[in-house]
Image (cartoon, rainbow, N blue to C red):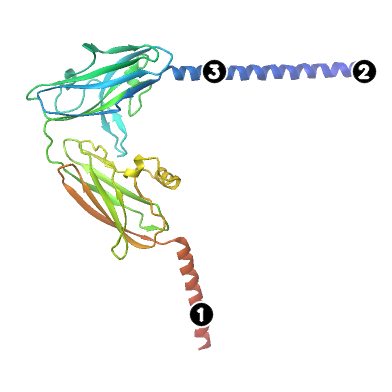
Amino acid sequence: MSHTILMKKPVWLLALGFWLLAVSLLSSIYYLVSIAGAQGDEFSLGIYPPILEINAQPPANIEANIYLQNLSDFPQNLKIILKSFRPSERGDGTLRYISKDTIEGPDPLILQKIKVYDQDIALDILSLDPFESRELTLKISLDSGDPLGDYYFSVIFVSQETQDTDISQSQIPGGIGTNVILSVGQKGVAQGKIKELSIPRILSTGPVPITLLLQNNSTHYVMPTGRIIIRDMLGREAGQVSILPQYILANSARFMIDTDQASPSASLEEQILRLSKKHAVLIWPKKFLFGPYTAYANVKLSENGPIFETKTSFIAMPIYTLFAISFLAFVLIGVYLRVRRKI
């Protein structure tokens, strides 16, 4: 009897040890996750506006307000950095940061003419108490005879613990920024083209993805407008899609989207279709399609033109129609072979 008790006691102690170890591990994991979450919540800023579009004729003293708010329970010590950006080569509207010490453009001294002010005090660093809001002023001084052209840069407020080298591509770890599109002088005639208009050649059903890639060859940014009209085999208008105006920066290309994508009313099917594509597309939401269609693109590159037009065609053949035609073909072939044998 005593022998049996001696055998069970170590097993009980072993089970208790495993249980205590499991509780300890779970507690440690919970603690680490809680700490990580708290640290992630320490940095939280709000900024408005996200984009500043400035058109100026030198000489000019430009002032634009930037509203910054600390949304966390912790004080924030921020560095103010000006960084030049360019559109990514993907043409999807994302940006990539480039030079650290200059703002690219026709004037190599433009960086010296741009400052962020808190009232009358020029800032390089900024401290915000918990939930404090601050209205700052971006000031740009342009002299008569300054070079004309576009400048694209971000005003970035970044945690002082974050190194400049951490800010790359389109990511700003521990920071937030406002993008500035500064156009100095009278804009010249816009130049560019429709680089691509394409639709899958054969579709079984809608919605229809439309690829529209526009190229801006100008020395200044443009915001194209326009629409795509779809006509059926009889030349009747079957539908149209309006192009959402978006910035296309100087000497760059961008895939366009439709105006409906700016609203949350898009169907789940349309959203899935957009996500399945490698680049942005316009969506014609019509679902039932049959026969050949032609899409006509009419694009106005800027307010003063030029206007570009092109077209592309596709064929819609519903799957059930293909099955019906295939079945009918097999039946007719069978009848033909039987008649031929009798003859």
Instruction: Identify which amino acid the numbered label 3 is placed on.
Output: Leu
Q: Secondary structure at mark 3?
A: helix
Residue 229, given in percent of the width and then of the height, sits at 28, 54
**Left or right: 204 as drawn, with respect to 140:** right
Front label number (3 vs 2): 3
**Left or right: 129 as drawn, with respect to 147:** right
Q: Are marks 1 and 2 in contact (CB under 8 Å)?
A: no
At 46% from the left edge and 61% from the top edge, which residue is drawn? Answer: 319
Q: Secondary structure at mark 1?
A: helix
Dot placed on the residue nearer the N-terminal end, 1 or 3: 3
Residue hosting label 2: 1
Mark 1 burial class by Cα count in 10 Å: few <14, some 14-19, many 20+: few
Dot placed on the residue nearer the N-terminal end, 3 or 2: 2
Classify residue 246 by image quadrant: top left
**Left or right: 80 as drawn, with respect to 41:** left
Q: Secondary structure at mark 2?
A: loop
Mark 2 burial class by Cα count in 10 Å: few <14, some 14-19, many 20+: few
At 40% from the left edge and 20% from the top edge, which residue is drawn? Answer: 44
Distance from the alpha carbon under mark 1 to that under mark 2: 92 Å
Residue 6, given in percent of the width and then of the height, sits at 86, 16
> Which residue, as the protein is rendered here, is positioned at the far bottom?
343
> Which residue, as the protein is rendered here, is positioned at the far left?
145
Distance from the alpha carbon under mark 1 to that under mark 3: 76 Å
Residue hosting label 1: 335
**Left or right: 71 as drawn, with respect to 297:** right
Instruction: Identify which amino acid the numbered label 1 is placed on.
Output: Val
Residue hosting label 3: 32
Q: Nearer the viewer, residue 46 or 324?
A: 46
Q: Are marks 1 and 3 in contact (CB under 8 Å)?
A: no
Q: Which mark is residue 93?
A: none
